[in-house]
Image: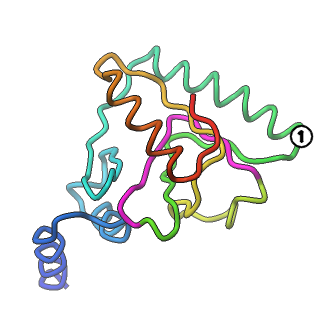
Amino acid sequence: MREAIMDRAAQVDERRGYTVADFDWLLQMPEYADGKFELIEGEIITMDPVGFVHGHRATRIARLLDEYAERTGTGMVTTETGYYRAGDGETLLAPDVAFTRMENLPSPDSEEFVPVMPDLAVEIKSPNDTFAHMRRKAELYLRRGTQIVW
């Protein structure tokens, strides 16, 4: 078993870019299990822990969106959930808050990454985030089918 793990790790490391399948596999490894990461155009990006204000803002936005979603039955709200566009195996984004319409959800009971992009992605600016970084992420969402990025 250990040999199989090492062989797979060597194959992944030799390639230029990671895929969503590679990324999912790596997250099963102990050294990745406790971290928060995104996959952006084949590159694994470590996400720093967020501060109190950031977390509180995300919670408030999620709560308000979730109240709306529950009241109208139009969709589901998630936080820090991995989304990717099926067929685009090199980018998996985890918005701080996301809203996905029911008709776009492949399976609301799945524990896997979501193979569609959310209809609304909310990225809360952290103190270390640059304008260029925030713009790039917004463009990544929009190019992959997200309708609105806050």
Left or right: where 42 falls relative to 150: left
- In this rendering, the answer to whether 31 lies above or below 148 is below
- In this rendering, the answer to whether 144 lies above or below 52 is below
Give percent across and percent down for residue 61: 64, 25
Residue 100, magenta (yes or no): yes
Q: Indicate the amino acid at tag 1.
A: Thr
Q: Which residue is identified by label 1?
A: 72
Give the quarter of the figure containing the N terminus: bottom left
- In this rendering, the answer to whether 102 lies above or below 147 is below
Q: How many marks?
A: 1
Give the quarter of the figure containing the C terminus: top right
Display coloring: rainbow
Residue located 73% across and 26% down the image: 64
Residue 3, magenta (yes or no): no
Give percent across and percent down for residue 63: 69, 28
Circle 1 SS class? helix
In depth, the one of 98 and 33 nearer the eye is 98
Residue numbers of the magenta segment = 89-101
In depth, the one of 3 and 92 nearer the eye is 92
Residue located 56% across and 60% down the image: 114
Give percent across and percent down for residue 55: 48, 23
Residue located 50% across and 39% down the image: 95
